Amino acid sequence: MKRLMLWMVSLAALSGVALQAQDLVGNWQGTLKVPSKDLRVIVAVTKDDGRLQGKFYSIDQQGIPSLKVTSISQDGSTIKFAVDIIGATYEGKMSADGNAIAGTWTQGNTPFPLDLSRATKETAWEIPAPPPPPKQMAPDADPSFDVATIKPNNTGATSIQQLTINGRDFETRASSLADLIKFAYDLQVKQIVGAPDWIDKDRYDVSGTPDHEGAPSVEQLRVMIRKLLAERFQLKFHHETRELPAFVLTVGKDGSKLQPTELNGPLPGIGMRPGKSGPELIVRNGTLKDLTGFLQMLVLDRPVVDKTGLTSKYDITVPFTPDDSLFNGNPPPFPKPADGVEPAPDLFTAIQQQLGLKLTAEKTQVDVVVIDHVEKPSSN
């Protein structure tokens, strides 16, 4: 009888050790093998009031801050987590000793193998210090391009391919003059009146650096492009106010579902990427004015007016299914959802369901620019 009791005690003790070893709390590290290079990553898991939380670090990518793990779960040996801000998910199986996870990292629709091991004092990789906030251009600066290059783009592109600023270096690819005017003055193409047809057909690559130190704000970047348009395209115009069909963005009856940004810096990140249920509209560190500007510039066929009254910066991800009314009838060639994945709703429904906002079609007074004079750009 005593021997049986000892055996039962030993089994209970071993069970306790196994349960402790299976605990997910701790730092997990592994190497993500993507086509361009190998990236070391760390997932730091904590527990608060019984709920798992996590932070994700990509330690080989300079300037990348820690990212919030937006959901994390453990069901037996199955581990799942998501990093919504970069559209990534992970699923893996924990080993019996609780010190390794074999799994798959999926970003967009692309899976990559990622095996994680529990970090110990001896094996742990160093988590880099958070990057300092970027030096911003003085708020009262009135910048111009110190040097700007404009080259014809003959790739056959029919829409803008890129508009970015990396540090202080500005670059845009396959932009038409209409694209530059729309960005510089926060307009939709129907708000540009009296222009020759080449302003939307001819495409250019533009690059340049400001003549002031620090990263410009969005408004300062617009000022720089306005000056470039006047100097190199000899653009002259006047403003008028006209009643036009538009979309008005308001807060839905149940309130917004917007999430404050996790990032820091003067400029937003806005664009499109493939997702599991359809293409995703993403905004990082952006205001709703940034969102409406992108919608009216590239997605919708009329001006978009922000009447939400919300002025904070947000991180936004909106999966949706495009129709022929969007992107001037030529939506980007994103892959279709995988078999068994329900397609995302249309854009208007997605914005209402996912953001708690509402886009309503109505006529309203909007600003238009009437082109008085414009020329093809001067040579560099």
Image (spheres, grey):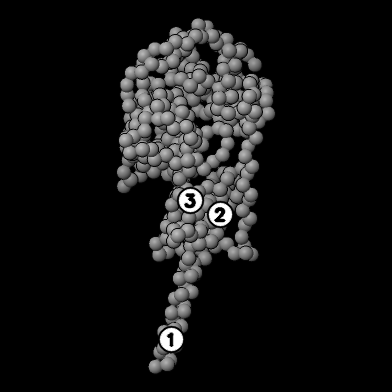
313 over 151 or under it: above or below: below
For residue 42, which numbered disc appears in the image? 2
How packed mark 1 is, by other alpha carbons closer than 10 Å (few <14, some 14-19, many 20 or more), is few
Q: Residue furthest front?
A: 309
Closer to us: mark 2 or mark 3? Answer: 3
Hey, what amino acid is under mark 2? Ile
Amino acid type, label 1: Trp
Distance of label 2 from label 3 (alpha carbons):
11 Å
136 and 40: which is toward the camera: 136
Tell me residue 56's x, y (percent).
53, 51
Asked if the residue under mark 2 is in contact with the one under mark 1, i.e. CB atoms within 8 Å, the reply is no
- The kind of residue on which mark 3 rests is Val
Q: Residues within 10 Å of mark 2 (few under 14, many from 20)?
A: many
Residue at the bottom extreme of this rendering = 1
User: Could you tell me residue 90's position as x and y percent?
Assistant: 45, 53
**Real-space CA distance between mark 1 and mark 2, rounded to the nearest whole angstrom:** 40 Å
Q: Nearer the viewer, residue 350 or 207?
A: 350
On-image quarter of the C terminus: top right
First of labels 2, 3 by sequence position: 2
Give the image quarter of residue 319: top left
